[in-house]
Amino acid sequence: MTAVAATPARSQSRAWKKLRANKSALVGACIVLVFGVLALLAPVLPIADPAGTDWGAIRKPPSLGAWMGTDEIGRDILSRMIWGAQASLLAGVVSVLIAVVVGVPFGLVAGYFGGWTDTIISRCTEALLAMPFLILAIALAAFLGPSLTNAMIAIGLSAVPVFIRLTRGQVLAVKTEDYVEGARAIGLGHIPIMLRYILPNVVPPILVQATLTIATAIIAEASLSFLGLGQQPPAPSWGSMLNTAKNFLSQAPWMAIWPGAAIFLVVIGFNLMGDGLRDALDPREH
């Protein structure tokens, strides 16, 4: 039992060392960490009120008084950027959490039991995958109503089919392994086998997919906010800031540059992290 327990530990150690050696993954992690810290510290940072207006400072360019300039009603863009990070990161993480909690059990059941169970779940999954992710999210958000909470639910449900398909494929590969057959031979039930022997071995690819899907969810949240289906004014959101900025691109381009750059950087950060995790957790590389 000691030798068997040591193998996963050594594998995790090698994966961690490989992840630390991946410079692009570390860069991505640093980007995400910076935005995450700013979002968490937004309530205590010495910044202006994100909803505070100043009619004497409308569309002012970046300066010492307003490092990122002001918007169409004199609100400080830096403050709104930091508070907007909360909405974007929260939407990304919560949406993916919803997708994992809903999708993984369905994929686990479909892959393990097969038969009609697999057929029904797989056909429903394929039907949902036939619809573009963003279109499905927009439709669900419009049905649920405009709010950040409903946007997160819509994005999460739209991402569920990806995790069902991924989990099912991984389970099909794992359930024929000798240790699973051995668990069946000693009389363990279906639930213990799925939770103790199969699920832990399909977690790494799910973790990689979750990291990559967070980036997609952040873009989706920005898109929904841009369309008025996400975070509602006056609460700041990078997507809604871009929606406002499109009307002032020639007079105040900084209104669009900062939220656009933030979305780009965060998405790149999560993608770099996901690529690094995929390389580190790939068993063929160990």
Image: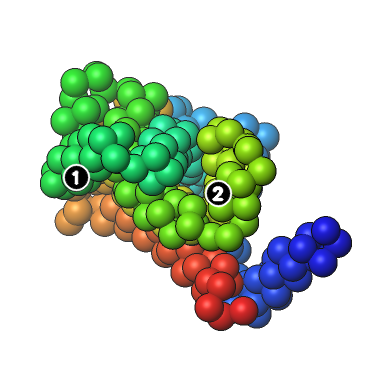
**Residue appearing at x 41%, y 49% in the figure:** 167
Amino acid type at image mark 2:
Ile
Q: How many residues crowd around disc 2 within 10 Å: few (fewer than 14), some, or many (20 or more)? A: many
Q: Do callouts 1 and 2 mark residues in contact (Cβ within 8 Å)?
A: no
Residue 189: mark in rendering: none
Mark 1 vs mark 2, CA separation in Å: 23 Å
Q: Is residue 89 left or right of residue 1?
A: left
Q: Earlier in the sequence, mark 1 or mark 2?
A: 1
Q: Is residue 182 left or right of residue 101?
A: right
**Residue appearing at x 58%, y 34% in the figure:** 189
Tag 1's secondary structure?
Answer: helix
**Residue appearing at x 18%, y 25% in the figure:** 142
Q: In which quadrant of the rendered view does residue 232 lie?
A: top left
In front: 80, or 84?
A: 84
Q: Position of residue 90 (x, y in %)?
A: 48, 37
Total marks in image: 2
In front: 99, or 75?
A: 99
Q: Which residue is mark 2?
A: 198
User: Eyeballing the image, is 277 above or below 124?
Assistant: below
Tag 2's secondary structure?
Answer: helix
Q: Which residue is mark 1?
A: 126
**Residue appearing at x 79%, y 60% in the figure:** 5
Q: What is the quadrant of the C terminus in the image?
A: bottom right
Amino acid type at image mark 1:
Glu
Q: How many residues crowd around disc 1 within 10 Å: few (fewer than 14), some, or many (20 or more)? A: some
Q: Position of residue 155 (x, y in %)?
A: 32, 37
Q: Nearer the viewer, mark 1 or mark 2?
A: 2
Q: What is the quadrant of the N terminus in the image?
A: bottom right
Question: Is residue 22 something that shows in the picture?
Answer: yes
Q: Is residue 209 left or right of residue 45?
A: left
